Image (spheres, rainbow, N blue to C red):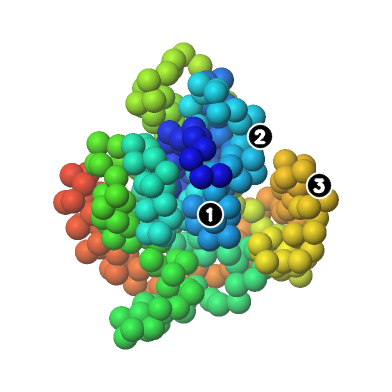
Amino acid sequence: MMGEEFRKIDLFIVGAQKAGTTSLFNYLKEHPLIEGHISQELSYFINDDEYKKGCSFMFKKYYNKYNKNNKSILIAKNAGLYVNETAIKRLHNHNKDCKIVYILREPVSRTISSFLMEKNSGWLKNDFKELPNEIKKHENGKYSLMYKLFINQSLYLKHLTTIYKYFNKENVYIYLFDDFKTQPIKIYKDIIKKLNIDIDFTPNFKIIYNQQKSVKSENFESFLHKFRKENNIIKRLVKKLIPYKIFIKVSNYILKLNRQESTKNKFLIDSKTVEFLKDFYKKYNDELSQFCGIDLTFWNK
């Protein structure tokens, strides 16, 4: 509704994908003065159809306890927001003073983790060894899905430059995945301090969210992947019949039923491709290190 005022999202975790964003979001959400959305990702700023419906739709869908007079801190997370300039611009229009959290993970390990996630989902048929050729295709002007998912999302400086185009550097908080793994409480407290709220509350850091798992049935996982798409007719019908909160819980439960712990990865990550990626990312790592003033030389070892 035109002219209606809404609370603003105070802090947004924009990425990087496969860099601990889900765990950080859930740790922050445990704080009694912080309110986060009920789904794993907030897609409002990325999804064109949702964005057209306005803020009232976003709060009704994603924030179960939403009250415009509530004084709690609103946080959000979407691990793919950092690669989408339109979404970043929309977030700026929503709240130009929003605090941005950007976690950086060594690009080769991020690429591998992202690749394994998509392979385990059952839909990706490509092999890891195809990545060097996908990079060469991109250099020749062909932008493929493989490059978009696994290479582009690891080119952090490119996306950080876009973020700085819309948000003041003072409001962009950069953390390293390595530090988050070893000292999650330090990063948690740093963010809480920046939000100007009580830091005495300690979340349960023993829980690690969104861990890599293999699927029991690739065919069933492929069906679930198609079902989760917004344009799926069955999904739209089910969402109309049951509340979104229940839909999310049921969806997550079904996903877990088809996942299992895996001690050995069944997809080949060949050393030749890994070495190629190390060489490829080195210049980007050096440029990012110089730009941010963060020593990232250990990424190249």
Choose between 34 and 275: the one closer to the eye.
34
What quarter of the picture does the C terminus occupy?
Answer: bottom left
- Of the image marks 3 and 2, the number of the one nearer the N terminus: 2
209 in relation to 148, above or below: above
Task: Give the percent coordinates (x, y) of residue 33.
Answer: 52, 21
Residue 97's disc is: none
Q: Nearer the viewer, mark 1 or mark 3?
A: 1
Are the residues flagged by discs 1 and 3 in contact, CB closer than 8 Å?
no
Q: Nearer the viewer, residue 134 or 15?
A: 15
Q: CA distance from mark 1 to mark 2?
A: 18 Å
Residue located 25% across and 62% down the image: 284
Q: Secondary structure at mark 3?
A: loop
Q: Amino acid at mark 1?
A: Tyr
Identify the residue position indicated by label 1 in the image: 51
- N-terminal label among 1 and 3: 1
Tell me if I can see residue 253 in this picture. Answer: no
